[in-house]
Image (cartoon, rainbow, N blue to C red):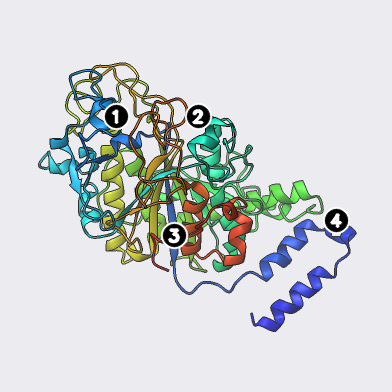
Amino acid sequence: MNESRRKFLRTSACGLTSAAMLASMDRLNLVNAMVQPDVAADYRALVCIFLSGGTDGNNMVIPFDDYNNPVGGTTNGYDNVRGVPGGPPGLAVLKTQLLQITPSNTSGVSYGFHPNLSPEAHNAGQAKGFMDIWNAGKLAVLCNVGSLVQPITRANYAAGIGHPYQLFSHSDQVNQQQSSIANTTGQTGWGGRIADKTNGLNGAVVLPMNISLAGTSLFSSGVNSRQLAIAAAPTSLANVLNLSWSGPTPPGNPFTAGSSFRTLLGFDQGTTLIKGSTDTTSSALSADAALNLAGNPSIGPFPNTSLGNQLAQIAKLIKIKDTFPVPMKRQIFFCSVGGFDTHTNETGSDPTNPGSGGAQSGTQGGLLTQVSQAMRAFYDEMVAQSLSNNVTTFTISDFSRTLQPSGSGASTVGTDHAWGTHAFIMGGAVLGGAFYGSQRPDHSGLLYGFPTLQLGGPDDTTSNRGQWIPTTSIDQYAATLASWYGLAGPDVATVFPSLSKFATSNLGFLTP
């Protein structure tokens, strides 16, 4: 569509009376769709992995050079607070067990990944995890990210300034991570709102832009765009929607083209609710038909775990993107893995063990094995499909956990709800092998936002338990991903209404 036609459509839309607009909102949405950008020439996808329950960032990315160098006294620092495995409180991962990394932007200061983020390092024959991707510069760490109403300091927090709505509540923090709305309960997700603004990049495709492998999600819910919730592998694509018909054979069967049921879907659409129901039903039937034709494409090996099966199904959906009458150009996927609410049994006597529970690696250790191996399999599959540069995978979670443990002793020690955590971003477009994040104006620490592990220190809340106040907001994180995906500059502020409160809108971890 040329520029003069866009201008005509916009001018015509603006000329409608307010009464006409109120009576014809659905038709106005069609006009809005007509002035969307031209269909994209390339393919890009975002894959969100939600670590449900609040994952302990303090045991995912750990100081290595400063492992036993306490800040401000002997009651601070990683090992002084967390203790060695088998002794009180028994939550620390031993320095000898860490996977040492030296990010490119930390002036030579080394950190360590939890050993189960690459379980093959200590266990020959295990499926690979993150380390090769990090070393290849295709995995980045976003430090101390969380929900923020505005940038705040410890003094602000103590004065009651800038607290997110219902901070430390699971349901509210899940909502804020998936909606990027921190001052109230969000009604739409930031993935859904991105789809609202970028649907035109796809053209008239048969599948919705947003697909969830973890049931209907807030993240994928937009104002106008619909999400498709489907089953994970090993269910074939022909059966992912679980649509069935127990009524009469044609002409009633809705799966038959030209059936009486499909004809009825075209009637009585003057009422908004009826039209909405009709459109949803029609979309589901069309998607089911398209996926039935796609069959069950072959992909590389994936671990037979919850997250492995979800990412395997996403890999299949990406592989068939060009088989539809109108190829998919933009897709946003959502998947989730639970169990990270580790008030007890977070670790075990051997954190390097790729298993979970009891005397092995503990709940978080086993889950990190699942996450790293599934993400690695997905990365390898994207490379095999020659789409590594086109697909970006990232993690988010409710919140982190307290640096100070709850309880003591391996297999019983755990952590409580905290705030800022670390996230992983993976893909060929990622400027990896580095840490990213913002720094508060009053903070004398590191430029990439890694928190000072000091109870009652500059990054702690007034709990004095190691509840890190985020230095980077979910708005900044999401906006960086959205800009790479194709969200136009003027739309970024609309999708992320709180973004203007933060100094940086693009954190720079992705190539343009």
Q: Earlier in the sequence, mark 3 or mark 2?
A: 3
Q: Earlier in the sequence, mark 1 or mark 4?
A: 4
Q: Earlier in the sequence, mark 4 or mark 2?
A: 4
Residue to which mark 4 is pinned? 23
Q: Earlier in the sequence, mark 3 or mark 4?
A: 4
Q: Using the image, determine if residue 23 lies above or below residue 371.
A: below
Q: Earlier in the sequence, mark 1 or mark 2?
A: 1
Residue sitting at 42 percent across and 40 percent down? 336
Q: Which mark is residue 35?
A: none
| Mark pair 3, 2: CA separation | 31 Å
Q: Secondary structure at mark 1?
A: loop
Q: Quadrant of the C terminus?
A: bottom left
State if disc 2 and disc 4 touch (CB < 8 Å).
no
Q: Secondary structure at mark 2?
A: loop
Q: Label 1 is placed on what type of residue?
A: Asn
x and y, in percent, of residue 388 in the image: 33, 63
Q: Which mark is residue 45?
A: 3
Residue to which mark 2 is pinned? 168
Looking at the image, which is closer to me, 508 or 27?
508
x and y, in percent, of residue 201 in the image: 55, 68
Q: Label 3 is placed on what type of residue?
A: Ala
Q: Using the image, determine if residue 446 lies above or below residue 159.
A: below
State if disc 2 and disc 3 touch (CB < 8 Å).
no
Residue to which mark 1 is pinned? 76
Q: Label 2 is placed on what type of residue?
A: Phe
Residue sitting at 26 percent across and 43 percent down? 303
Asked if residue 216 can be seen in this view, the reply is no
